[in-house]
Amino acid sequence: MRKPEILTPQSQEKDIILRVDGLTKMFGAKKPQAREMLRNGRSKEEILKKTGVTIAVDDVSFEVERGKIFSLIGLSGSGKSTVVRCLNLLLKPTAGHIYYEGEDIAAYSPRQLLKYRREHISMVFQSFGLLSHRNVLENVAYGLEARGIDKKTRTEKAMEMITMVNLEGWEHKSTRDLSGGMRQRVGLARALANNPDILLMDEPFSALDPLVRRDMQFEMLSIQEKLNKTIVFITHDIDEAFKLGNTISIMQDGRIIQTDTPEKMAQSPANDYVRDFINSADKSQIYNVRNFMQRPSCLVRQKEGAQVALKQMRANDVSSAYVVNDRMKFMGVITLDAAFRVRAGEITFEEALINDMPSTTADTQISDLIPIASHAKFPIAVLDDKGRLQGIISKAAILTSLT
Ligand SMILES: Nc1ncnc2c1ncn2[C@@H]1O[C@H](COP(=O)(O)OP(=O)(O)O)[C@@H](O)[C@H]1O
Ligand SMILES: [Mg+2]
């Protein structure tokens, strides 16, 4: 696999919003005895048998970056829900610490904890958790109501979120009249209405059928992009984890086995459990553009003009060049023919630029580019969020990534 060559490298410090350090959760009365046995290397089954204590989460540590999606994946019973319930202290950890914005949430006073739960962290459940005697609007406004926000403000805010999840027109319907996908949109809107920094989503789409599920994944990504939320996303589906997660931790038997980006995890799985998970994945979902993009062989600054573009195209034996401005902002592609016409005075350099071509971002899944690739005349430009050129990805790279 080709190493990415990024034209504008941005090495930035990680901005950690949530840090989990040595989290352990046991269920049962004889915890000290269980802990002693654990320390002595006894297996979890043995401990359960002897003490009746379930070690649901065992010394788990991870960091969640602000504005990113952190995905926790594992088989049923591996401890995912227990971890996520500890994050908002629905469950009290047996050991370990959880830091929100650097503060140990176990040290919160009851008032601080209430504020943390109401304003900073919201949960979306697989079972939707909607109130069936309330309509859509009242469900979405529920958290705001609990916070004592006046009716006008909370209705406005709730309507804004209902629009965000594409449920406009349904606000006065009973949630009983909604399909599963729509109910989960209500659940999402309700969580978002609180404007939390972090959304906890515990297998939110698992109960939905595959097509609806794909819609919801897409919806969630576009909402996340708009609102820039941090999301802790639990799933037992590797495709979903790879599709959504910027970082993934894989859990087995209460422990985290590996934490990595989807690509790195796919390239070097830590053990057979991880490998098995990955083998069950749809490979095209694993790979994103970053892994396949290249530096354009012909990169021309706008101010350098057609003459330089021509020279470079000849030197590199290609028939098109990528044009950027002084700030690396992508301006378009110029072809050999067009550059000749500029030189002949027939058109200006700006007129020669083709800029109505598709572009993509480094985080895009390659599989999402397939429909575009088959029509693309040039390698697709990879841009950052400021429109700066980071690289290009060829049609061949896109189409062969799946084999
Ligand atoms: N309240 C509880 N009491 C006792 N055992 C529990 C409780 N909640 C979860 N467990 C056990 O903890 C383990 C992890 O469960 P859970 O976190 O729900 O896993 P997952 O979400 O990955 O399916 C399981 O063995 C489960 O039976
Ligand atoms: Mg669970």
Image: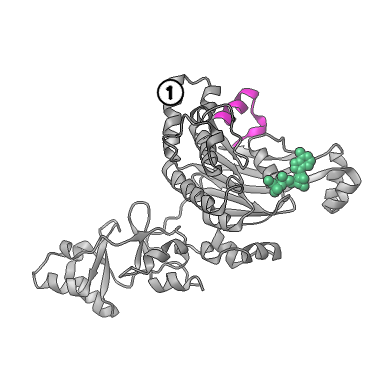
Residue 201 in percent (x, y) is at 58, 43
Mark 1 crowdedness (10 Å alpha carbons): few <14, some 14-19, many ≥20: few
Question: Does residue 155 sit above or below 227 in this rendering?
Answer: above
At x 43%, y 40%, the residue is 166
- The verdict on residue 231 being magenta is no
Quadrant of the image where one finds ligand 1 = top right
At x 49%, y 46%, the residue is 220
Residue 24 in percent (x, y) is at 74, 43
What range is drawn magenta here? 103-118
Label 1: which residue?
153
Residue 273's image quarter?
bottom right
Given the image, on which type of amino acid does mark 1 rest? Thr
Residue 322 in percent (x, y) is at 28, 67
Residue 394 in percent (x, y) is at 38, 71
- Residue 71 is left or right of residue 359, and the answer is right
Q: Nearer the viewer, residue 313 or 234?
A: 234
At x 51%, y 65%, the residue is 284
Q: Residue furthest front?
A: 177
- The verdict on residue 115 being magenta is yes
